[in-house]
DNA sequence: GTTCTCTCTGACAACGTTGACATCCGTCGT
DNA sequence: ACGACGGATGTCAACGTTGTCAGAGAGAAC
């Protein structure tokens, strides 16, 4: 009989032999099952320690059909929005005995598809998708195949796909109304990736705010189409080269806002003196830049916690019905708009609907 | 015969049945093996597509003894030092067909041990450890068990443990000499975690620079012992409450430096006017804060790439001998010290030894 | 015509674990 | 004294894949 497994590591068989019991008894001890005598248990525990035995999760997963791992698909861990989210997800997962397999996609739908595919081959027990660019039909198919699925900042119309998101429309409105209240009339939008659900929502909020203020929507004042410092710089440059450049900018996210900030500084323009800026996300950086950035905060840690908890509840069958958790965005007023920090400029009108207040939770009623 | 596997997903058996071949032939097609007729191959490919079949990586890993995944153990993904490193590792791994399982440990040796243990149960093909706090003996044991292992910013004396690190002693010297050259004589060190290899090295570099300048080492000027904004704030506060507070501070990392910056601002002190600050890492934030932080840069992306490439080479048996790659730290002069940005203050003496120049690579000669 | 070689194919036994079920042995109730 | 019961243990067949080996044809070489 082999003293060790193929790859040199001890198996349950060696433990059993050493403890003088059957492999089933060892299995029972490992899994804390009942009906094992104290004597046997002690011998098994000793043998495990002596051999430094570790159960093979692959074999276990193969027979149980559960891998105790989840897949996490994000755009780019180097984008400061994601680390707090990932960390929270990881913490919840670890606390419940799951591992996280991380995949970056750079907002590319094909890479995302590939990542999901590989994750599925790995037999992850569930999937969390943030900044997902894959067509909705693809995700519906996943759900139809009974893969537990939670999406962040996007919605999938399927009775088993849960979501946690901040109300980006409300957030866009919040940001724009703040600039409006400060007297700005030419407000630009620094757009994010066109395929992004969040981008479209923030743009919608921006337009809503303009309309409510009786201002026309000017397509020339929308520039950008990505999410990076460089994209922010370029978009800001394009805007500044307009005949009538904007006096204020609402950026898709803080990265774009920071890029814009760089470009403004490069041209010797002052913020907020010459141009006011509002970002989105409230990444750690935002509070530290010069001037500190006014931005719409997303509760990243809470989002991560909610997403992971929800997913694992689905995985463990505690509740499989769809649940959509919508969190309220929050305007963080710092110095990049010229308002009194810590409080929003007086809003021109009351926000409508539930968003903008506290987080609301909607059950699985829809679809 | 079951139409689908236990968990509802098609198996190689269904594919074989549908294509009218044996499972072995399907296996051959999947793995691109030779000796499959065009006709058979086509039928198999079609069946795979129709069933949306995905090979089960667990089963595959069980029989081949390789999981095509690596474990990545770091202190905290929310610490801005790590995302670029992680991203680079992930990219290399993905390009070579591996997945990354991520674990945060919060610098806690027990959690690290636990994470490594779980990763080993998962049968990862190798391990990358950054900010590792576990005793060296533990890692030597791992290496003795033939687990491919690469450590970042730490060294393990074992003929099979590779490492990639920046010369933190040289970095500490660089930072301190910069402050010295600017005329500072009371220079404090904002210490990182005492158990950290990097912390000890940077402290050593700091002391070396002092000695070379003929200055005494004053233990009172060392404060801190963690790595966070809060710790930086507190340590800075303690330093400022001294009878003779320092005129300059070298911080273990940029997070500590930023914390110090906050505390100084809170007390109405100016940087660099009243106190000069040098950080370490050159996180993205560093260039954006006010004032832009002078800091010692670590080439995080390159480190990640090197570590992952090295590990996978070991995993794939391309070369198993130990290799230590030492990269040179680089002083990035911005505004937090009062020097002319972009260039270091004139160093009081020539750096000694290979570090401080270009990166050097030492082979497996040691141990 | 026989043997050899080469291509293609499939049967079968692993891999390390758990689940279903069987068995053995005391002890208790009657 | 006997059956029933329940604790403690073991046997065996999965799980879904790949590795080993053997075999069937089809040409090629002698």
Image (cartoon, coloured by chain):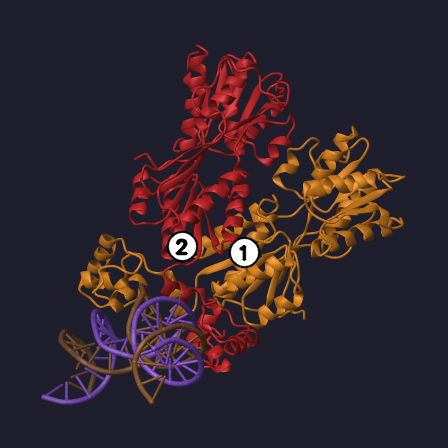
Chain colours: A red, B orange, C purple, D brown
Question: Numbered disc 2: what chain?
Answer: A
Q: Characterize the local packing of mark 1: few (<14), some (14-19) or many (20 or more) Cα atoms within 10 angstroms.
A: many
How far apart marks 1 and 2 lie (CA) works out to 18 Å
| Quadrant holding the N terminus of chain B | bottom left
Residue A79, visible in the rendered structure = no
The residue tagged 1 is B72
Q: Nearer the viewer, residue C27 or A216?
A: C27
Give the image quarter of residue B4.
bottom left
Q: Residue at x 31, y 39 (%)?
A: A158
Q: Nearer the viewer, residue A116 or B287?
A: A116
Q: Characterize the local packing of mark 2: few (<14), some (14-19) or many (20 or more) Cα atoms within 10 angstroms.
A: many
Residue B75 location, x and y as percent? 61, 52
Q: Nearer the viewer, residue A337 or A62?
A: A62
Between tags 1 and 2, which lies in front? 2
Residue A138 location, x and y as percent? 31, 43
Question: Numbered disc 1: what chain?
Answer: B
Q: Is residue A257 above or below residue B305?
A: above
Q: Residue at x 53, y 15 (%)?
A: A347
Residue B16 location, x and y as percent? 22, 64
Give the image quarter of residue B21.
bottom left
Q: Helix or strand or loop: what does disc 2 sit on?
A: loop
> Residue A124 shows which numbered tag?
2
Q: Across the whole image, how many numbered discs are drawn on residues?
A: 2
Give the image quarter of residue A106.
top left
Q: Helix or strand or loop: what does disc 1 sit on?
A: strand
Q: Is residue A14 above or below residue B243?
A: below
Q: Is residue A121 above or below residue A246?
A: below
Residue A278, visible in the rendered structure = yes
Viewed as shown, does residue B68 lie left or right of B357? left
Instruction: Name the residue at the top extreme.
Output: A214
| Quadrant holding the C terminus of chain B | bottom right
């Amino acid at each position: 009989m082999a003293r060790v497994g193929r790859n040199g590591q001890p198996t349950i068989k060696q433990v059993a032999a050493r403890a003088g019991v059957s492999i089933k008894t060892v299995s029972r001890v490992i899994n804390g099952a009942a009906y094992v005598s104290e004597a046997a248990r002690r011998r098994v525990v000793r043998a495990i320690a002596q051999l430094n035995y570790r159960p093979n999760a692959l074999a276990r997963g193969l027979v149980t059909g559960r891998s105790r791992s989840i897949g996490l698909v994000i755009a780019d861990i180097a984008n400061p929005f994601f680390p707090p989210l990932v960390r929270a997800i990881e913490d919840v997962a670890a606390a419940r005995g799951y591992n996280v397999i991380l995949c970056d996609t750079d907002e590319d739908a094909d890479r995302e598809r590939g990542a999901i595919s590989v994750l599925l081959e790995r037999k992850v027990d569930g999937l969390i998708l943030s900044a997902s660019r894959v067509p909705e039909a693809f995700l519906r198919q996943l759900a139809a195949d009974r893969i537990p699925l939670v999406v962040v900042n996007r919605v999938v119309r399927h009775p088993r796909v849960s979501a946690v998101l901040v109300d980006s429309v409300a957030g866009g409105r919040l940001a724009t109304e703040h600039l409006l209240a400060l007297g700005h009339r030419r407000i630009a939008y620094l757009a994010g990736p066109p395929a992004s659900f969040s981008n479209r929502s923030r743009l919608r909020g921006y337009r809503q705010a303009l309309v409510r203020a009786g201002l026309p929507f000017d397509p020339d004042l929308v520039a950008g189409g990505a999410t990076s410092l460089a994209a922010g710089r370029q978009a800001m440059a394009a805007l500044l080269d307009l005949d009538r450049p904007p006096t204020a900018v609402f950026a898709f996210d803080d990265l774009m806002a920071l890029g814009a900030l760089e470009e403004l500084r490069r041209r010797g323009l002052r913020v907020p003196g010459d141009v006011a800026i509002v970002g989105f996300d409230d990444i750690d950086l935002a509070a530290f830049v010069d001037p500190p950035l006014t931005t719409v905060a997303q509760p990243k840690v809470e989002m991560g916690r909610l997403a992971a908890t929800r997913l694992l509840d689905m995985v463990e069958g505690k509740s499989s019905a769809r649940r959509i958790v919508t969190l309220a965005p929050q305007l963080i007023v710092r110095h990049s708009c010229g308002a009194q920090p810590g409080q929003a400029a007086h809003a021109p009108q009351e926000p409508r609907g539930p968003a903008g207040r506290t987080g609301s939770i909607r059950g699985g009623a829809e679809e």
